[in-house]
Image (tube, coloured by chain):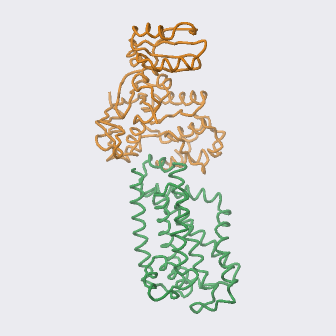
Chain colours: A green, B orange
């Protein structure tokens, strides 16, 4: 069962190992810039946020953002590249593995990229700054990262499956993914929104992800409602990704 | 004799376009079969149906007795596919490409290693096995794709225009591999190179507009043209002017030009006199009657218009 998915994941990890250092270097640069620019540049202007210094408030969101963005990027570009450029998806499809193997393999690869890159950013923030958390909080935080990476990996798979032009994937990143991430509590708490729209923002899965993961990492408490939203979203995204992939490759 | 492949009244439509219409075919096990046709004839659609990549709109397709629609996984265990375009993984070395294929077929590691060594030897890529396909010539990439299709010892090998874009030496090399496999599997190839079909295949079907037009050995298909009047006509000068003239005659059924030499198929021997009356003899260097080739059969059946 899912031996094919494992083989595809294994292939992706072999390719990742070959360029691990440059991949991690590239992925660390952007969140670290945000951390240094906003965390230290605005230090004098921003007091504590929700009872913690701004650099501490921001760190979990940046780590989560790196993980889910990497999951989206890897899944979207990898699926697009294998489908449209290398056409290796077609090579996989004439072997005894199923379409479920292909899509699950790609989703898990995206998720692994996200997890590794999130860890890399966390390590750099830990090493370079005074940001520290209790080890006991990590398990709860990882639950959010796993679900978040899964959702973004599925979304990436859907984009890589449906979109034929690479520039369209770039537009989806700019118009959908980045606003979803930035407006959901990475840099400011959702409580900052006007009361009239706060309810809507809270219902977005990315708010559950960023708010929930931050509280899990900093305070060690798990928000059940947020976890439920993420688990439900991950299930829907996975079913959607599999169904869309299945339908698209039949065309 | 048992069939390796059966297509029974297969139709495939893409919206309003009918790519394959009511197509039936039996391919006997252990033979090399060629499907010929111009671009857009429906050859690739048939290969995609037989390799489980497309579902037919109606009809049944069987590979070694297994239904491609309902027993796709069993079918895919038995087939090897060389697609029109090289779809190698450029981020894996030649050996890793073969290894991934072995894994996707669930082969044991020791068996994979042995088989991959054997195939790299067969296709002459042992010395380049740790290099990436991007560094290979077109012919080497093609050989690697053929090797990949053979990793799991398929019972039916599909080759979709296997030598398109290759230089003559590489084409000959691919032909040699195909011939060497003849005894161990059924080979189904599509091509629009007549010499390829003529040299390799036990049986040929020419198709166009989604339908089979003729079926037989290369010799039998050429016999169909025995009544045809194929001439080679060479001009000393004004080849362009003569080309336009020849193309305009209703009794010229096919016309091909190579430099100042034309190969033309006339509707009958009575057409020769009006032809000579029209073109005169001033510029003619050579005129001779030819044996019809498979290409003449092809052009005769599918017409001479360029397809989009």
Q: Nearer the viewer, residue B136 or B110?
A: B136
Q: Is residue A222 left or right of residue A40?
A: left
Q: Position of residue A195 (x, y in %)?
A: 46, 89
Looking at the image, residue A114 lies above or below residue A200: above
Give the total number of marks visible in the rendering: 0
Q: Which picture quadrant has residue A46? A: bottom right
Looking at the image, residue B294 lies above or below residue B71: above
Q: Position of residue B295 (x, y in %)?
A: 46, 22
Looking at the image, residue B230 lies above or below residue A11: above
Q: Position of residue B188 (x, y in %)?
A: 43, 33
Q: Which picture quadrant has residue A69? A: bottom right
The residue lying at 42 percent from left, 19 percent from top is: B253
The residue lying at 53 percent from left, 76 percent from top is: A142
Looking at the image, residue A77 lies above or below residue B184: below
Image quarter (top left, top right, bottom left or bottom right) of the N terminus of chain B: top left
Q: Nearer the viewer, residue A70 or B257?
A: B257
Q: Position of residue B182 (x, y in %)?
A: 46, 28
Q: Is residue A33 left or right of residue B17?
A: right
């Amino acid at each position: 069962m899912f031996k094919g998915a494992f083989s595809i994941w294994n292939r992706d990890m072999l390719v990742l190992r070959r360029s691990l250092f440059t991949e991690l270097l590239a992925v660390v640069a952007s969140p670290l810039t945000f951390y240094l620019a906003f965390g230290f540049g605005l230090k004098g202007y921003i007091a504590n946020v929700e009872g913690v210094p701004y650099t501490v408030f921001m760190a979990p969101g940046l780590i989560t953002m790196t993980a889910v963005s990497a999951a989206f990027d890897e899944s979207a570009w990898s699926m697009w590249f294998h489908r449209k450029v290398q056409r290796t998806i077609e090579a996989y499809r004439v072997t005894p593995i199923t379409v479920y193997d292909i899509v699950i393999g790609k989703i898990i690869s995206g998720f692994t990229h996200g997890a590794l890159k999130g860890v890399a950013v966390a390590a750099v923030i830990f090493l370079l700054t005074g940001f520290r958390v209790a080890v006991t909080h990590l398990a709860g935080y990882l639950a959010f990262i796993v679900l978040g990476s899964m959702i973004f990996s599925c979304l990436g798979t859907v984009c890589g499956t449906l979109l034929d032009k690479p520039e369209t994937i770039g537009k989806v990143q700019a118009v959908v993914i980045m606003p979803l991430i930035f407006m959901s509590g990475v840099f400011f708490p959702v409580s900052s929104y006007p009361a009239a729209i706060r309810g809507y923002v809270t219902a977005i899965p990315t708010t559950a992800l960023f708010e929930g993961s931050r509280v899990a990492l900093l305070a060690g408490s798990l928000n059940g409602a947020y976890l439920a939203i993420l688990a439900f979203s991950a299930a829907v995204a996975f079913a959607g990704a599999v169904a869309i992939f299945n339908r698209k490759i039949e065309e | 004799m048992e069939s390796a492949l059966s297509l029974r009244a297969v139709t495939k439509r893409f919206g309003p376009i009918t790519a394959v219409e009511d197509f039936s075919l039996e391919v006997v096990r252990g033979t090399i079969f060629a499907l010929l046709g111009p671009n857009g004839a429906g050859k690739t659609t048939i290969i995609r149906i037989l390799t489980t990549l497309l579902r037919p709109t109606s009809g049944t397709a069987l590979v070694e007795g297994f239904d491609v629609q309902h027993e796709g996984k069993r079918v895919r265990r038995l087939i090897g596919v060389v697609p029109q375009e090289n779809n190698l993984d450029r981020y894996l070395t030649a050996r890793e490409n073969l290894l991934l294929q072995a894994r996707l077929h669930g082969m044991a590691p020791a068996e994979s290693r042995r088989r991959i060594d054997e195939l790299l030897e067969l296709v002459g890529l042992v010395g380049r096995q740790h290099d990436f396909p991007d560094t290979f010539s077109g012919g080497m990439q093609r050989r690697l794709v053929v090797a990949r299709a053979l990793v799991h010892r398929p019972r039916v090998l599909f080759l979709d225009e296997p030598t398109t874009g290759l230089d003559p030496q590489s084409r000959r090399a691919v032909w040699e591999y195909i011939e060497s496999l003849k005894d161990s599997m059924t080979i189904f190839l599509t091509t629009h190179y007549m010499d390829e079909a003529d040299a390799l295949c036990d049986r040929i079907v020419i198709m166009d507009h989604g339908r089979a037009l003729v079926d037989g050995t290369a010799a039998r298909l050429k016999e169909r043209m025995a009544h045809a009047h194929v001439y080679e006509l060479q001009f000393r000068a004004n080849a362009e002017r003569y080309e336009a003239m020849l193309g305009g005659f209703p009794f010229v059924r096919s016309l091909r030009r190579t430099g100042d030499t034309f190969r033309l198929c006339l509707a009958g021997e009575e057409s020769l006199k009006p032809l000579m009356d029209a073109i005169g003899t001033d510029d003619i260097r050579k005129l001779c009657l030819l044996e019809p080739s498979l290409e003449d059969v092809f052009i005769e059946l599918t017409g001479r218009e360029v397809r989009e």
